[in-house]
Image (tube, coloured by chain):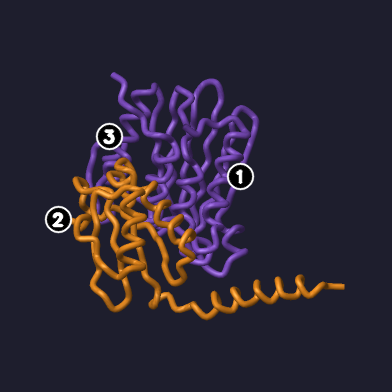
Chain colours: A orange, B purple
Amino acid sequence: MKSIADIMAIREAMQSQIILRDNTDAEKETHIVVGMGTCGLNAGAREVFNAFVDEVEERKLKGVRVTRTGCLGDCKNEPVAEVHVPGKETVRYAHLNAEKAVEIIEKHVVGGKIVSDYLLKD
Amino acid sequence: MKCNVREVSLILLDLIENSISAGAKHVKVEIKVNSGGLKLTVADDGEGIDKENLARIKRGERFSTKDSTGLGLSLLNDETKSSGGKLKVSSKMNKGTKVIATFKEVLKIGNLGHSVAAIIDESYDVSLKVKIKGREMAFDTKSVKAKYKSVADMQFSGAIREIREKINTNLSFIGGELI
């Protein structure tokens, strides 16, 4: 027979399932798109991608999705990533690394303020 | 002349990118290592490469298309040659493309887990097989995705991190060099 603790644990697990199920609208998701063409990969884009994913997990961020795309056409500025927050203009960051990725999640995705130091400059 | 060959797990990620750009729904990756060297095969069911471009690739020519800079394959061509091996690209329009890169040295496979983490996506499936001198490991994105509601969920819940770690552990276990 299940103890009260067991039942509470099951209920808690189900609650988080319910919350996740409600968040099905991809259009409402913030997308972080990392350019992973040859230049990007050579400059460390793979590590940037994984840094973003780890930070999403670390901060338990719902409604944020990290994806890859091919070459974003900025070989000299790689690694490059775009941040699409629904309803806001797309922002492109350049010369990224794992530490900057973490900062972007903290300041831009969570805090709502663009990190101007890391913006792609033409 | 020897050029610096990239880590194999980065090369395969580069090739998978090509497959994705070509609209592939399935990509099959195989790495085979024995004392003679390493063979990397990436086969996809994407739109294929036309005869003209295939000929240019065979000539080692670097050219760009709307989807790619062409750097990846021309770099790979140089890398295989510098290691005494070769690059073979075959393709059929609307059927798919197969890239086989052979190296006459046992190259470092590198951070395979990190590479796999980057290609878990709803729009395509990747299967991976690594054989190192008779020891084998396999992974496919389709079966892991089946356990989750979405890739966003997998990222949020730490499943991606787990997969990454498991792949690298398995790779070490069968004798692959991570770093």
Q: Is residue B160 above or below residue B171?
A: below
The image quadrant that residue A12 belongs to is: bottom right
- Closer to the observer: label 2 or label 3? 2
Q: Position of residue B26 (x, y in %)?
A: 50, 56
What residue is rendered at 55% in x and 78% in y? A19
Q: What element carries label 2?
A: loop
The residue to which callout 1 is attached is B138
Foreground mark, 3 or 1, reads: 1
- Which residue sits furthest left? A122
In the image, are marks 2 and 3 on the same chain? no
Q: Residue B60 carries which label?
A: 3
Residue B77 in the image: state x and y as whole percent: 33, 33
Residue A3 drawn at (x, y percent): 82, 72
Q: Which amino acid does label 2 sit on?
A: Lys
Which residue is identified by label 2? A121
Could you say which quadrant of the image residue A106 lies in? bottom left
Which residue is rendered at x = 50% and y = 64% of the image? B156
- Amino acid marked by disc 1: Ala
Q: Going 52% across and 21% down the picture, which residue do you hit?
A: B36
Amino acid on which the number 3 mark rests in the picture: Gly
Query: Is disc 1 placed on a helix, strand or loop?
Result: strand
